[in-house]
Image: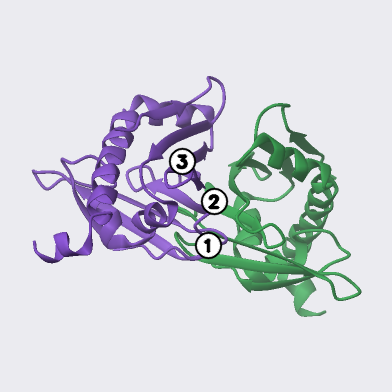
Chain colours: A green, B purple
Amino acid sequence: MGTTKITAIPGTPFIDIEREVAAPRELVHRAYSDPELLRQWLGPRKYEMIVDAWEPADGRRWRYVHRDADGTEYAFHGVFHGPQTVDRMVQTFEFEGAPGYVSLDAVEFIDQGGRTLIRTHSVHQTVEARDAMIEAGMSSGVEEGFERLDELVGRLGQPVAASASS
Amino acid sequence: MGTTKITAIPGTPFIDIEREVAAPRELVHRAYSDPELLRQWLGPRKYEMIVDAWEPADGRRWRYVHRDADGTEYAFHGVFHGPQTVDRMVQTFEFEGAPGYVSLDAVEFIDQGGRTLIRTHSVHQTVEARDAMIEAGMSSGVEEGFERLDELVGRLGQPVAASASS
């Protein structure tokens, strides 16, 4: 099990997250790029995840929805910016419940010899907006997402025969 | 002539700009929204301004090019985020010479009884990127743009007969 390091220095609009995953970075990058894989890990388990659009390429819009057991939906959208590679992806992030309040997220995938360090750097428009994101309990959602990512890359890393027989 | 106040507190990724314009905010907002008007004021006079796309609406991509006398082009693009109104517009901003390095800009138009206070709040991904923007001399370009905006809203505010006779 990995551990997640979340850094949010008081008085800054930044959130930095580090997490090491026991999988090669091509596989981790695939889990971030392929909407069917993304659906299987991003966010808390209690939500159904519906991916409306997710094609990492410069200027493309993305959107997904978290739906809870009683049907309440939390929708998010943004746009990919610049080159989207196995080294680095950049996107904007907007919760549709707070239109016009946007953060800018960069994620880097760093090869650790078969393992991968995922490093996320987010910047909010204000320190207050950053603080509100922390106070809304984002850390538990992030932690649970990474646990699911661990499980996903574990399944994907199995020999093909095992999944073919299932 | 208005004066421009640019604030960039050391150690933060923010740039804040304030400028008062002697025109009602509907007119100022139009100068920011209509690509034909935008072309007439945004940026230094020495560049020809080519607007490829500029339709302020949530999720729409924008792009423009500054071309100097010898044909060198500086291109920029981004995306509008959330509601784009006479109160507030939000967009991302990326110089194509530095792909993947993005800032997030919000502009507010505040009614001052026939005059308008324009308030721009930008956040960069890092303090270093913000500092590089300042050091690249953005303040002179901003200042010259606002002078041209003053001239534009002056022309637009003239009686219709005056421009019809030109």
Q: Quadrant of residue B64?
A: bottom left
* Element type where label 1 sits in the image: loop
| Percent coordinates x, y for residue B118 in the rendering | 45, 42
Can the viewer see residue A18 in this picture? no
Q: Chain of mark 1?
A: A
The label shown at residue B117 is 3
Same subunit: marks 1 and 2: yes
In the rendered image, the residue lying farthest to the top is B10
Answer few, some or many: residues within 10 Å of disc 3's Cα (few below 14, many 20 plus, some between 14 and 19): some
- Residue type at numbered disc 1: Pro
Which residue is pictured at 86% across the width and 70% down the height? A68
Q: Amino acid at mark 2?
A: Met
Q: Camera-side residue: A87 or B124?
A: B124
Q: Are marks 1 and 2 in contact (CB under 8 Å)?
A: yes
Query: Which residue occupies the foreground of this view, B163 or A131?
Result: B163
What is the number of the mark on residue A89?
Answer: 2
Whether residue B134 sits left or right of residue B85 in the image: it is left
Q: Could you tell me which residue is drawn at 42 percent across and 28 percent down?
A: B5
